[in-house]
Image (cartoon, rainbow, N blue to C red):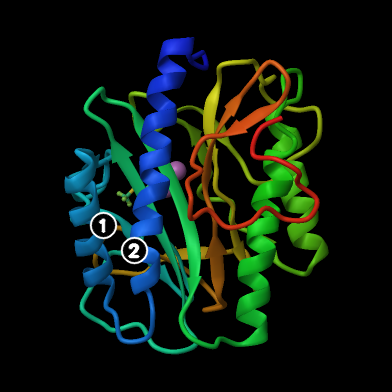
Amino acid sequence: MTINIKSAQDIEGMRVACRLASEVLDYIAPHIKPGITTNEIDRLAAECMAQQGTISATVGYQPPGYPPYPKSLCTSVNHVVCHGIPNDKPLKKGDIVNVDVTVITKDGWYGDNSRMYLIGETSIAAKRLCAMTFDAMWHGIVQVKPGARLGDIGHAIQKFAEGLGFSVVREFCGHGIGQRFHEEPQVLHYGKPGTLDELKPGMVFTIEPMINAGRREVKEHGNDGWTIVTKDHSLSAQWEHTVLVTETGYEVMTISAGSPPLPSFVTSTKT
Ligand code: MF3
Ligand code: CO
Ligand code: CO
């Protein structure tokens, strides 16, 4: 199996899809505060996508063995690791929530990204987990350049996260993306330097580490076929960008006016 290399024209299509995916997160950001329900976040995102002329990649998404995913995005609160389904429960002060948005443009290109949001004042531990998971994602991103390997990305994330006493979820990974939601390669968020596929200009994939405050094990929540939680009920955080391998390094594609500032060890969204 091979990793798809995007042409200059493909990359133009991906830039549009990824910017729009990031703009959906910008659009909902001012509304995410105590009292809002995750269904309301979902509705706002659907409204934004309708204005953009994009559609959600998640509505009706049904990998083998799963029920069709019912909503326009994923909202994963506190100990939910990923794939949380929006519902009518209001968010409350102290919660943390990941919102994960994937859009499809009219030309069929996918842009995939997620951010953490803090609901009102949170514990110092929750704030730190969210901030350090953001940095963990960026430690992975800065590895990206031609000649580097996928294992370099995973290793950088794992070393940073475990060095802080956090753990890295193994069951879910980043993925190639283009005119399909999930394609090769799998981008593990743990690993050994110098292993796995070599990165080449034109590859596009996501980096989306899920980092737990406690143990790394996860389980299915139970009845909906999607929601994944930490086994020990510890908090979990995740950030996601879609990244292009360029001739000289990387270009983070899921960037827009509301993207959070870069960590101090990163100088640019493109190298
Ligand atoms: N957006 C997620 C990812 O980063 C996938 C969500 S699939 C869903 O790959 F069906 F749960 F929405
Ligand atoms: Co995503
Ligand atoms: Co993804």
For disc 1, the neighbor class at 10 Å (few under 14, some 14 to 19, many from 20) is many
Q: Is residue 15 left or right of residue 189?
A: left
**Residue 59 in view of the camera:** no
Residue matched to label 1: 45
Instruction: Pick out the residue farthest to the front.
Output: 257
Label 1 beta carbon within 8 A of ligand 1: no
Residue matched to label 2: 28
x and y percentages locating residue 162 in the rendered image: 77, 61
Q: Earlier in the sequence, mark 1 or mark 2?
A: 2
Which quadrant: the C terminus? top right
Q: Residue at (24%, 52%) from the top-left corner? A: 48
In the structure shown, which secondary structural element does the residue marked by tag 1 occupy? helix
x and y percentages locating residue 141 in the rendered image: 67, 40
Q: Which amino acid lies under the numbered mark 1 shown in the image of this protein?
A: Ala
Q: Residue at (39%, 56%) from the top-left corner? A: 25
x and y percentages locating residue 172 in the rendered image: 50, 48
Task: From this view, report whether residue 93 is shown above or below residue 169.
Answer: below
In the structure shown, which secondary structural element does the residue marked by tag 2 occupy? helix
Q: Kindly check if marks 1 and 2 are in contact, taking CB atoms under 8 A apart as contact.
A: yes
Task: From this view, report whether residue 48 is shown above or below residue 104.
Answer: below
Spatial CA distance of label 1 from label 2 is: 7 Å
Count the marks: how many?
2
Q: Could you say which quadrant of the image residue 199 lies in?
A: top right
Q: Could you say which quadrant of the image residue 105 lies in?
A: top left
x and y percentages locating residue 159 in the rendered image: 80, 52
Q: Residue at (73%, 47%) from the top-left corner? A: 139
Q: Which amino acid lies under the numbered mark 2 shown in the image of this protein?
A: Ile
**Residue 159 in view of the camera:** yes
For disc 2, the neighbor class at 10 Å (few under 14, some 14 to 19, many from 20) is some
Q: Which of 268 and 197 lies nearest the eye of the viewer?
A: 268
